[in-house]
Image (cartoon, coloured by chain):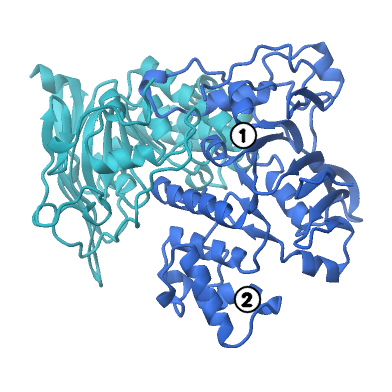
Amino acid sequence: MMQEELVLEVQGMKKYFPIKKGFLQRTAGYVKAVDDIRFQIRPGETFGLVGESGCGKTTLGRCILRAIEPSSGSVLFRDRNGQVKDVIKLDSKGLRAIRRDMQLIFQDPYSSLNPRMTILNIIAEPLVCNRLARGPEIKEKVSRLMEMVGLDSRHLERYPHAFSGGQRQRIGIARALATEPKFIVCDEAVSALDVSVQAQILNLLQDLQEQLNLSYLFISHDLGVIQHISNRVGVMYVGKMVETADTRDLFAKPQHPYTEALLSAKPVPDPRKKSNRIILSGEVANPANPPSGCYFHPRCPYAKEICKKETPEWRQVGTNHYSACHFAGELNLRGVPV
Amino acid sequence: MSQNEAIIMEMKDVKVHFHLDEGVLKAVDGVDLQLKRGRTLGIVGESGCGKSVTSQAILRIVPKPGEVHGQILLHRRTENGPQVVDLVKLDPRGKEIRDIRGGEIAMIFQEPMKAFSPIHTIGNQIMEAILLHATEDKAEAYRLAVEILKKVGMSNPEQRMNEYPHQLSGGMRQRAMIAMALSCNPSVLIADEPTTALDVTVQAQVLQLINELKSSNDTSVIFITHDLGVIAEMSDDVAVMYLGKVVEYTDVDTLFHHPKHPYTRALMNSIPSVGRASKRLESIEGTVPFPMNLPKGCGFYSRCKMAKDGVCNVGDVPLVEVAKGHRVRCLLADGVESAEPEVRSS
């Protein structure tokens, strides 16, 4: 049911939030936050998920972990014993067991750590909950985890406020690693950090991936970060995946006009390369009231009649390269030199 | 005097100190900058480097108990010929600074949702600025406000005049903010992280708008951001700040192609950017120290890879002109080969 080499496969994932109206709270419509998404992740691979705010990338990440209950779809996951399970169908006991293998790193290192718990207790919590350690063993394991993420293990008894943003993010990573997971969702894990610290954390995440053969779902709005860390990339727009491809392919030869526009909108840190940039008109469509046909057509410079009427199909346009555009493969879109 | 003619604002040894119970926090510690007419000066640095406080010092809106020292000279063109005002000497609540604030010097803030009043319409707020500085006729102010909204690319400006800030999207709100800032034809525009809260596609729109308005109105811009990509895009001159001090100050091309200060170089090597795939990023070890009771010598000493004991940690490091128009605050700058950093060689 799932190909041999995969660690995670998401199929037909949907999350519709109802819009309640009036005194009787009847459902007046739906916000299609995540709409029919599918993708796969291999062991030791980083899948980058990029898109603008409100495109549903965080909701998708949480649906995969079932932190939010998805409306429909399935998440096939290979656990540590090599058994494939559908995360969406698991009961609470099964879910608890499988969550040892899938963890989450949060965006904001300030609000994701309890200010009234010591670092020891924060990192030990997953160990205690999953009964992975007891007694003096806990302290030993936590010390090892702290050293693994580059923190001084003498600081065990300190509280989060004593640490800087980058150090707190390391604490968050140590906590995620405590249960020895195979798969981690990094939700904007470096967005709140300054560039010099961001580089430290990105390097750490890559080192840990190599050491522990982790798979990441790396969610970010920053194309530079995504290109740096990902093996494959998915681009989301208003709840839908519009393109997925190997990183090199996606950046060099985008096959969706939205990807092209995103790539060209990102300012390049080189004054000699002031590009003739594509400026999209308008703003991201409202997911509660999306446009007809292709959601991107009101902003798309290549839009034709058909784009207003028909929703484009998800189709393969190259090796490992998929796009949801009526004209994928026909348009000569501009990438960036890789 | 021809050189002075080209300069609209000069900051000389500007310091902003906060006297707290724990000691003196030197948020800005001796900054010298010049803003040329019709040009953009970029200020870049990480959080806590003092870039925003610098802009607050210009408008004299530094929160208490901050104290501003030094000189901020604004070269004005009045009916009685050119005139120079030292903004530091003005009473922060006085009439003169209130005339300049929003009139000659306007500011765009990072988070327009916080900068606008939530209980007044966009139109009201823009008209208020116009009534304060440009005209006393309400009908005229209304006309000017609609015109400026049209200019910043707002759809149905008449309708937007009656809307509240929460009814606009982030990009539209930032446009309204820019409209308000430009409504009185300022000669200096300070943009403090104007696009940080926006998505990239909207950011591209706003940056283009600022550039268009700058050239059509002949405004000088101080552009503050942490994003080196945006700096490269927008600036003519750039100042890199670290711990309240300018560590490198030069034109944008030199900065990106021949950076001298170890901090600038490390900063550039640590950005993961589109079009540069490499396995590892060069990171700067440690974090920015807290700007209170700092040790002697170079502020970057503790994190610098080139730092030499007995040289860098002895006394204050001066900002030295190493080439024409290229100032660097590093004792070892001469030893840094001026070759292009490996970052971009294309």
How far is mark 1 from mark 2, CA to CA? 52 Å
Is the residue at mark 1 from the same chain as the one at mark 2?
A: no
Query: Which amino acid lies under the numbered mark 1 shown in the image of this protein?
Result: Asn
Which residue is tagged 1? B162
Using the image, determine if residue B295 lies above or below residue B247.
below
Of tags 1 and 2, which is closer to the observer?
2
Q: Residue at x 73, y 26 (%)?
A: A319
User: Residue B118: where, in percent of width, then height?
Assistant: 56, 47
Q: Kindly check if marks 1 and 2 are in contact, taking CB atoms under 8 A apart as contact.
A: no
Q: Residue at x 77, y 60 (%)?
A: A79
Using the image, determine if residue B127 lies above or below residue B262.
above
User: Residue A256: where, in percent of width, then height?
Assistant: 70, 22
- The secondary structure type at the circle numbered 1 is loop
Relative to B64, is A212 on the left or the right? right
Q: Residue at x 21, y 42 (%)?
A: B247
Which residue is tagged 2? A125
Query: Which amino acid lies under the numbered mark 2 shown in the image of this protein?
Result: Glu
Classify 10 Å Cα crowding around label 1: few (below 14), some (14-19), many (20 and above).
few
The color chain A is rendered in: blue
Relative to B257, is A3 on the left or the right? right
The color chain B is rendered in: cyan
Residue furthest to the bottom in view is A135
User: Residue B332: where, in percent of width, then height?
Assistant: 14, 42
Relative to B287, is B322 on the left or the right? left
